[in-house]
Image: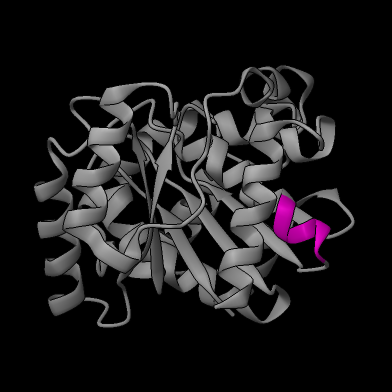
Amino acid sequence: MPIWGIVNQKGGVGKTTTAVNFAAALAAKGKKTLIIDCDPQGNATTGVGIDKSQTKATLFDVIVDGVDGTENAEVLQNSLHQVSDNLWIIPSNIDLAGAESVLLNAVGKEQILAEAVQNLAADFDWILIDSPPSLGLLTVNILAASDGLIVPLQCEFYALEGLSQLLKTVDLVKRRINPRVSIELVLLTMYDPRNRLTQQVEEEVRGYFGEKVSTVVIPRNVRLSEAPSHGESAVVRYPSSKGAEAYVALADEVLAR
């Protein structure tokens, strides 16, 4: 059962779009899939139609429970929200912004999320964790909980800038905390084949990461941007759009591996 984090400390590269649409594509293929929204902005939560103000429990409650060492099964169950037949989410809201300070003095602070995820692992075929745009304790917790990583990269001039810090952090976590974790997939997002810069970025990224770069690219597509305002993934709301088709192709590629 794969547990994949979707990570990149740069904002606006398509992490949440990837989490929501890749999850929806897996769910449509009959895979019981869980999204864990680990970003205090809670965009994945609203992106699947969950009202952040109406949730019994969120990821913040799960983390506080883990820090306390109580590991209350009821908190975990209350945090699970079903989106559709095969899709669930553990939502997040602005409360999660306080998680870093809660984690700071916790014993085993890097492993709190991993423990919660392991308690859920048997119930799902796939777990996808959407990350915040930073390399703080929350992201380290994601790396400690994951066995694979998707790194979305926007096709722009600064695509690779700052990536060395992410790779260094992944390497440190691999050596010290979680030997299973590795980058499974680099995903090119906001791809415009007519743009010469896009082609140059693709060349550079494929040259650097080789076979880890997905053969599927995610195009610039207005439907991917519109879908969250309806509380649905583009895969569900606009299945014939280029963006939705790309995420379905991504799910096919990953499952074929």
Viewer-proximal residue among 49 and 12: 12
Q: What colouring method underlies this structural image?
A: one colour
Query: Measured from the top left, where is residue 246 in percent x and y?
Result: 63, 44
Query: Eyeballing the image, is 56 above or below 79?
Result: above
Query: Eyeballing the image, is 255 above or below 231?
Result: below
Res 241 visible:
yes
In-image side of 224 versus 116 (left or right): right
Viewer-proximal residue among 159 and 5: 159
Q: Quadrant of the C terminus?
A: bottom right
Name the residue: 24% across, 36% down: 201
Name the residue: 32% across, 29% down: 198
Viewer-proximal residue among 52 and 191: 191
Prevalent SS, magenta region: helix
Name the residue: 30% across, 71% down: 182
Viewer-proximal residue among 207 and 125: 207
Per the rendered image, the range of residues in magenta is 25-29
Res 233 visible:
no
Find residue 10 and report its image quarter.
Answer: top left
Q: In which quarter of the image is the N terminus?
A: bottom right
Name the residue: 82% across, 39% down: 236
